[in-house]
Image: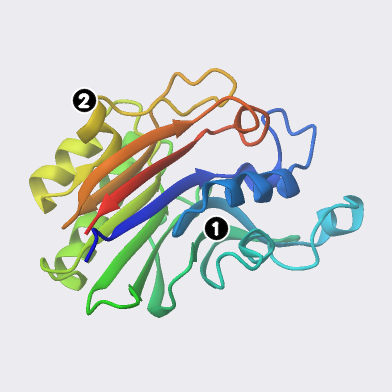
Amino acid sequence: MGQRTLKVLSYNIHKGFNLGNTRFVLSEIREALKDIHADMVFLQEVVGDHKVHRRRIDAWPNAAQFEFLADRLWPHHAYGKNAIYEAGHHGNAILSKFPFDTFDNQDISTNPLERRGLLHGVVHIPHTTQRLHAICLHLDLTKRGRTRQVEDLCRRIEQEVPHNEPLVICGDFNDWSLRVTNILKRELDVHEAHYNIHDKHARTFPAVMPMLKLDRIYFRGMVPLRAETLTGTPWRNLSDHAAVFAELAY
């Protein structure tokens, strides 16, 4: 039997707008995602509903953004509603080719201005007895907030994720000081895919000329085969973040 692999992509889609908020590019994001054929897609800043944009933007989808992006390629999806406002709401989402056994969204907000959640899904990979734990999150802009949220993340994993079940943690960590990787490695024996392969974190922000290393794919119980940042055409003209991709063997 050949080696089984999991292809994972993580992407802050900036609510479907380009870097300068001058164009709504959700349809282009969907086509770019389809070309990668990831098994699981972890999304941040995904709009579940926005009444004003729906009226004003002709290309605004009738469905939630995560459903529009999932299309027919990812029949299973989980959404965590984090920021709720008069016009609608947004949060994190996971698109999956595999059905979810369960999923749960934990509020990890540390202040009223940044509503954050930890979306934790469990999928049963077909043709195996393995359960895979998949976590999608978007951390605070402040160091103090991120520190508390990483503590919440570690606590949840210790309580909810058995060591013999593979784990993937993806998202926008806003960790320009590069502290999170060492903490997760020390506390959870978790590794970062791009760092593991290239000995450095991926530069992902801003997408037009990536400098800051904000977006990550962490794993446990798997072996990284490939990791890359998705830059160039069309990615540089879509969100303000570049997407990150990894292929993991399990």
Amino acid type at mark 2: Asp
Q: Is residue 2 left or right of residue 42?
A: left
- What count of labels does the image hold? 2
Res 85 visible: no
Q: Amino acid at mark 1?
A: Gly
Q: Is 10 in front, or is 197? A: 197
Q: Is 70 drawn above or below residue 179 in the view shown?
A: below
Give the residue at the far front of this rendering. Answer: 1
Q: Which residue is mark 2?
A: 199
Q: Is residue 176 left or right of residue 207?
A: left
Q: Earlier in the sequence, mark 1 or mark 2?
A: 1
**Label 1: few (<14), some or many (≥20) within 10 Å?**
many
Q: Is residue 225 left or right of residue 19?
A: left
- Residue 68 percent coordinates (x, y): 69, 62
Q: In this view of the protein, which residue sits in the foreground, 92 or 222?
A: 222
Distance in Å between CA atoms under marks 1 and 2: 31 Å
The image shows residue 241 at horizontal and vertical percentages of 54, 33
Quadrant, the N terminus: bottom left
Do the residues bearing badges 1 and 2 touch, measured as CB atoms within 8 Å? Answer: no
Q: Which residue is labeled 1 in the image?
A: 91
